[in-house]
Image (cartoon, rainbow, N blue to C red):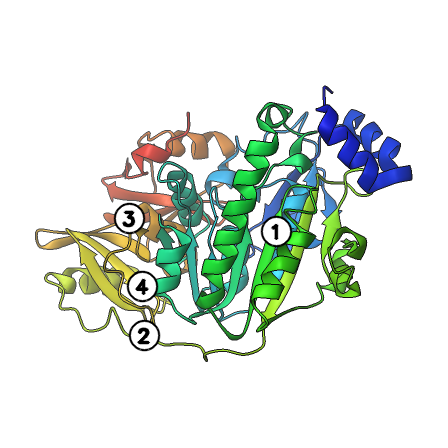
Amino acid sequence: MNLPEEYILRMKSLLKDEYDEYIASFDDERLYGIRANTLKTDRDEFLNKGLYELEPVQWCEEGFYYNGADTRPSKSPYYHAGLYYLQEPSAMSTGAAADVREGERVLDVCAAPGGKSTQVGAALKGKGILVTNDISASRTKALLKNVELFGLRNAVVLNESPDRIASAFPSFFDKVIIDAPCSGEGMFRKDPDIIKAWGKNMIDSCLAAQRDILERCASAVCEGGYIIYSTCTFNPDENERQIEAFLERHKEFELCPLPENMGLDRGRPEWTVSKDEKFTLCGRLWPHKTRGEGHFVAKMRKTSGMERMNFNGHEGAKIDGFEYFEEFINKNISGVEFDGDFETYGEKLYMLPKGLPSFKGLRVVRNGWYLGDLKKKRFEPSQAFAMGLKPENVRLVENIKDYDTAVKYLKGETLETELKEDGWVLVSFDGLALGWAKSQKGRLKNKYLPGWKWE
């Protein structure tokens, strides 16, 4: 591993006697992580499926290690059913530290490709609000797919800057997750190409971006709410000292403990200007001390400020053709609460969580649960709608039990069916929704989203 001399000198200064152990960790095998989608399964049920050889990740209850050298979980119908998300184990620590509870409002401000958002979105259990954002338009494509694949019904996907989000959502969120752009030193072992970009200019750019995101997001948190800040780097300037400077500017925030069961290494007060012991409340993952790449997490509570704001920016819009959606629901769907605010964009129908502000002037990628299209005198359900349903919610279901038939469906092929009734059918695999089809005379006309087809 060809590490920059400047980096070596700094790490020797930071780690001292531990430096050789850290360098030796570069020879360890890469670690692979998988995280169960608790909207579609629970931990025990997931393990009982016996899909892969799994070992638990200490800091994430629904997270596991798997043997990525011999296994490809992304080439499985279970992956296309949104049963799990593939994520580097250390990266699961940010979502775990957020400790999101059902009904909260959460902003994931640097979200793509969606690991943290799917993690906290599952923890919300369909209640509350998730606003997930990335400033890169190209990266929001993967973010949107993962949000929909996971079956998140209460998520809004934005492509915005932190300052514009903070202006639109003042004192709105219970928790804001900032997995900040960083110099990536914790990922050197996993991706040596990051080393080529490392240097003073990159670090300075990251420091400025981190400071700006923290500064902007402070006003989006309500009194009693939290900022969860994380990076995948070792540099104290981007970690403890970045948090120290933020707390100096914002006396209304205080550091608070991370969940004890996460088993994180404590932050180092000696790496701050003040040497204050409170910085032991920060947490670190070191590749030479644990089974994961490098990571840093800090959690701050807003002790004073404005109470949580409520808005009604999406109430009361009249929707032409809404009766066709109601017709479809009455005929095909049961056991699902449609208790949000409905909006259309063109012929597309969405359901948004209640209490949101107006999105005027914001770049919105997806403004809620995309239900389908209001065509001329009919409603056609979307792929995102299917992924947010369970087979027991739909009148006509084709439950595929074998792998090969599931792959045929995911490739867009027509299937045979024993269903006696024509109409919209939810196709599932092992009890997990895959998408829609239309039954007609013993055949299933495939309605799987073309852009998601199995390659």
Residue 316 place in picture, x, y as percent: 19, 73
Circles 3 and 2, Cβ within 8 Å, touching? The answer is no
User: Which is nearer the N-term, disc 2 or disc 1?
Assistant: 1
What residue is at 39 percent from the left and 69 percent from the top?
Answer: 170
Question: Which residue corresponds to the image point at 30% horizontal and 31% vertical from the top-left?
Answer: 414
- Amino acid under label 4? Leu
Q: On the picture, is 427 further left or further right than 176?
A: left
Question: Within 10 angstroms of label 4, few (less than 14), some, or many (20 or more) residues?
Answer: many
Type of the residue with mark 2: Phe
- Asked if the residue under mark 1 is in contact with the one under mark 2, i.e. CB atoms within 8 Å, the reply is no
First reached walking from the N terminus: tag 4 or tag 3: 4
- Tell me the distance, in whole angstroms, between the alpha carbons under discs 4 and 2: 13 Å
Closest to the camera, between mark 2 and mark 1, is 1
Compared with residue 214, is residue 317 higher up or lower down, i.e. above or below? Answer: below
Q: Sequence order check: which comes first, mark 3 or mark 1?
A: 1
Residue that badge 2 annotates = 311
Q: Position of residue 324 (x, y in %)?
A: 15, 60
Question: Can residue 100 be spotted in the picture?
Answer: no
- Circles 4 and 3 in contact, beta carbons < 8 Å: no
Q: Of marks 4 and 1, which one's residue comes earlier in the chain? A: 1
